[in-house]
Amino acid sequence: MVKKNACVFISGYGSNLKSLISNSRNHNFPVNISLVITNNFKAKGLLHAKKNSIPYFIINTKRRNFENKVLNLIKKYNISLICLAGYMKIISKGFISAYKKKIINVHPSLLPKYKGLNTYEKIIQNKEKKTGCTVHFVNEKLDSGKLIVQKSFFIKKDDKVDILKKKTQKLEHKAFSEAIIKIYRYN
């Protein structure tokens, strides 16, 4: 199997990045993590890229033409798939159309419920009995692309935001890799 090159966009700790890097070492996993991009120079996830000798770039999203720079990097590294893993910026329609059906995102809810930010707070506020995560293709509408994989768990009465986040992230680590395998199984 010839592996494809994938790029992971992060903004924070990078636990999904760490999981994807680990899974990419499996010879049956369809992608290599070949590039990491962040909009946050303090992103702790950059340590995972450094530790694994993966090229990374810190992009100033306030600069004009920053998306052109990112697209040039993606082209340079022959990237076939972009994984948004806790990337806290909305990607423009132009960028999405340039990479149609090649951008996936992991979201901490069972979409279509609770799109956007403050997901865990909304889940608790609405007294949901079940939650989880969704990996989906990115389209022009926020958290609205075609679903690839969903994983769920039942919420305990005393679960707070931090507990929901930990449980959800554990599922995300599995769901993200399953989604990538599913995408390439039929290609």
Image: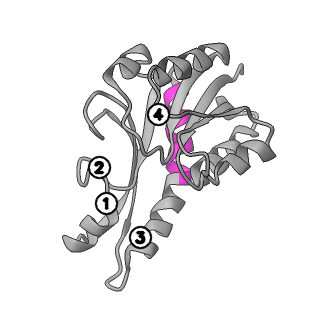
Label of residue 116 in the image: 2
Give whichever of discs 3 and 4 has the lower sequence position.
4
Q: Is residue 98 above or below residue 53?
A: above
Contact flag, marks 1 and 2 (Cβ < 8 Å): yes
Marker disc for residue 164: 3
Give the residue at mark 4.
61
Q: Residue at x 29, y 49 (%)?
A: 116
Q: Which residues are magenta?
A: 173-185
Placement of 127 over or under 59, stated as above or below:
below
- Residue 104 image offset from top left, x and y in percent: 45, 34
Residue 22 can be seen in this image: no
Residue bearing the label numbered 1 = 119
Q: Quadrant of the N terminus?
A: top right
Farthest-out residue, left = 126
**Hey, which quadrant is residue 125 in on the image?**
bottom left
**Tag 3, which secondary structure?**
helix
Q: CA distance from mark 2 to mark 3?
A: 16 Å
Amino acid type indicated by mark 1: Thr
Provide the secondary structure element on which disc 1 rests.
Answer: helix
Q: Left or right: where does residue 89 sit relative to residue 93?
A: right
Q: Position of residue 179 (x, y in %)?
A: 49, 38
Task: Please tell me whether mark 3 or mark 1 is closer to you in this view.
Answer: 1
Cα separation, mark 4 vs mark 2, equals 19 Å
Q: CA distance from mark 1 to mark 4?
A: 24 Å
Q: Earlier in the sequence, mark 4 or mark 2?
A: 4
Give the amino acid at mark 3.
Leu
Q: Looking at the image, is mark 4 or mark 2 nearer the viewer? A: 4
Mark 1 or mark 4: whose residue is earlier in sequence: 4
The amino acid sitting under disc 4 is: Thr
183 part of magenta stretch:
yes
